Image (cartoon, rainbow, N blue to C red):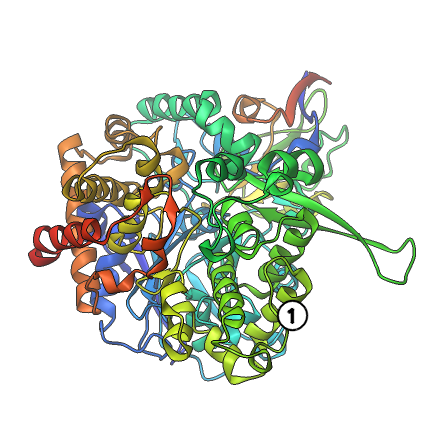
Amino acid sequence: MKILRLADVEKCVGCGLCMFACSGKNVKNQRIGVGHSGIRSVSLSGFERGATVIFCHACIEPPCAEVCPSKALKPRKGGGVTYNEKICLSCHNCISACRIGAIFERDDGKIAVCIHCGYCVDFCPHDVLEVVEA
Amino acid sequence: MIDRVLTINLSDYTYEVEERSDLAEKWIGGVGAGIQLLKEKMNPSADPLSSDNTVVFSVGQFTPAYPYASKTVALFKSPLTGELGETHAGGRTAMAIASAGYMSIVIEGRSEKPVYIVVDGDMVHFRDGRSLKSIRDSLILGRILAEIEGGRGIRSIVRPGYAGEKLVRFACLTTETYRHFGRMGLGAVFGSKNLLAMVVKGNRTYSLTDPKLYREVYSEIYRLGVESEVMKKYHLLGTAENVIPLNELGGLPVKNLTEKRFDCEEISGEKFAEENLGRRIACSHCPTACIHIAALREEYENERYFFKTIMIGYDYELIYALGSMIGINKRSDLLKLIHRVESYGLDAISTGVCLSWATEALKRGIVSKDQTIVPLEFGDVSAYLKAIDFMVTQPNEFYSDLAKGARYVAEKYGGTEFAMAFAGNEMPGYNTGYANYIGLLIGLRHSHLDNGGYSLDQKVSNLNPEETVERLVKEEMWRQVLSSLVVCFFARNIFKPELVERAFRPLGFEIGIDDLDKIGERIYMEKLRLKKDMGYEPDISQIPERAFEVETPRGKLERKFFEDALDYYRRTYLSRV
C-alpha cells in the first residue's frame, strides 16, 4: 500500500494548494474551498519560521480508529485509516485522539482525514509531498 | 455563489449578515461589490479618523475556486489623502474571509475601549483588547493572537501595528507577517476605531454547477501558472530583479530625485538572492511563491558570539523607498530599515518618501536640526532608524506633522516642490516618464498598480497626451474586473478575458467577454463618481515641481503634456460622473 509522505518539508512555501486539491477531490459532491481538506498547510508559529503541512502519519495502530464508535474509521493496510462518512456520527472522538492534530472538522460536521490517495501531490508546485510504498 | 455581507458595528458591538446576490450578480465581488457597499454605508464627507469612516474588506467568486485568486480588496476613506482609500493584500486573508462564509466584511463605528474582533464562521466575537494595547512590534501581537485564537492554517490575522495606534496617516495593516494592506493609511483608520486586529477563520465550502469543467479550467490555470516564464521571474528574484534594469534606464528614483543614477549593485535582486535569501513563501492558493524573505544575522554590540537572526521580507518598492530614495546602498542597513518599518506597521513607500523630503528640507534649511532631532543625511542608517521611531512616537510637532504625510508637512513648512507625493500619496519607485506620473494622478487609488503607467512608459514611446490617458484608463478598467474576482495582478497575463469567461461558467455565472469589459467600465465609473463626491479633481498642481525638473528615460517632462492629458481626462471621464 502506498502512503503520502513529506519529500522535503523545507521547500514548503505555505501556498495551501494541497488543501484546495484535497478539499475538492470528491467527485460525487465536489465543493470548492478548503473546508473538506484532510491536509493542512500551516506556518511555524508565523511565516518567518517557515511553513509545513500536517496530515495523517499513517500510524500502524491508529488511535483514531480505536475511539471511533461507529467504525467509520478503520485501520488501513500499510498504515493510517479508511473513512466511511455515511456511518460517521460526527462525534469528533478521533479529532481528540490524533496526537498530531491531523483530523479536521468539515463544514458539514463530519471529518476530513488523509487517506493517502496522493491526489494533492500533483498540485504541489514545489515537490514537498510524495507518494511512496509503505 | 459568494454573496454574504457581514456588517460589524464597533460602536454598539453588534453584527448582522445579509445575503446580497444583487451585488454579486451585478458587480462580481471584490472592488465592484465593495464600492457599492461603501456608497451605501458611508457618507462621502465623513472624517476619515472618526466613527463615521467605514472599512469594507471584499473577496470575489474566484477566491475559493482558483489559483492566484489570493487577494482581498479593502476600501475606506483615506486619512492620508482625504478621499477614497483602496488597498489590496495577499496572505491568507482572502481564503479566510471566503472560508468564514463572506464576500464582504464591513466595519463601522468606533469602539469605546481597545478591542479586537474574531470572525469565526457565523459568529463574531468582540474581545477585550486592553491588555494588548501599545505592543510596539506587530509581529509579537500576531503571535499572541495566533496562540489565543487558534485556527492554524485556516485563519488570517489582520492588524495595524503601533503606527496605526499612533494614527500615523500612512500606517498599514499587516497580515500573515509579510503581506500588507499598504498605502493610504488603513492602519490609522483601525487605530482611530480602537480596533487592534481582525481575526478571520472558518471552514465553509461552496457548491459548483459543472464539476467537470471546473476541474479542466482549474488544471489549465495551474499549468499556465507553473509553466509561465513571467511567473517564474516573480519566484526566482521577485520584483527586486527590477532594481538594476531600472537604474540603468534612469528610472530608479535616487535621493529624492536629486541624482540620476545610484550605486545599487549591493541592493539588487541578484545580491539579495545570493547573499540573504532565506526562504520564499506564498499567499494562499498561489503556486508561484513570490514573497522573498531575507535572513539578517547580526551580532549584538559588546556581546561577542551573541547573535540574532531575523527574517525580513523584501521587494522592489522597499529597496527603492528605504534604499535608493534615501541613499542607502548597504544591504544590512536596508534590511534594518525594512525591519523597523515592518515592526511598526508603517507603509514603506510613504515612510521612505517622507524621510527623503525631510532630508532635503534639512539640507536646504527649511527645517532645523532642532526639529529633526537627528542630523538626517542621505545614506545615514542610524539617523533614519531614529527618525522612523520619532515618526511613530512623535516627540515634537515636526514629527507629528511628518506622520501626516509628505504633502501635509511640505505645505506647512515649505518645500512642496520636492515633496514627492501625487494627489497626496507618496510616489512609488518609478521615474519612468509621462505615463507613470499621469497614471499616479488619474489612477483611482493613486497607485502605480492602478494602470501600470511605469510599464507603459517602458514599452511604448511617442504616445500623445490623449493616447496616454486612453491606454491608462483602458488598463485600469480591465483591472477593475481582476480586482473584483479577486486575482493577483501578477497573474494578469494568465487571467485574460477568454479564460475569465470560461472560469466563471462552472461556478454558475454566464458572463460574456463583452460583458466583462462593460462591468470593468461600470465599476471604474462608479469608483470615479465616489471619488468625485469625496473631493477628487485631478490637477497639475498635485504634481510636485521636481517631476518636471528631473531627467527621465523619456527626457525632461513638459508641463504642457500633463495639462493636455489632465484636461482630456477631465473632459472625457470626470465630466461624465
In depth, the one of A100 and B172 nearer the eye is: B172
- Is residue B356 shown left or right of residue B335? left
- Residue B210, quarter of the rendered image: top left
Residue type at the position of mark 1: Lys
- Assign a secondary structure to mark 1: helix
- Residue A53, quarter of the rendered image: top right
Percent position of residue B208, x then y: 32, 34
- Is residue B555 shown left or right of residue B124? left
Could one spot residue A71 in this view of the protein? yes
Q: Residue at left 26%, top 50%? A: B438
Q: Residue at left 49%, top 39%? A: B247
Could one spot residue A55 in this view of the protein? no
In depth, the one of B419 and B169 nearer the eye is: B419
In the rendered image, the vertical position of residue B507 relative to residue B36, given as above or below: above
Tell which subunit mark 1 falls on.
B
In the rendered image, the vertical position of residue B526 relative to residue A40, given as above or below: below
The quarter of the image holding the N terminus of chain A is top right
In depth, the one of B294 and B518 nearer the eye is: B294
The quarter of the image holding the C terminus of chain A is top right
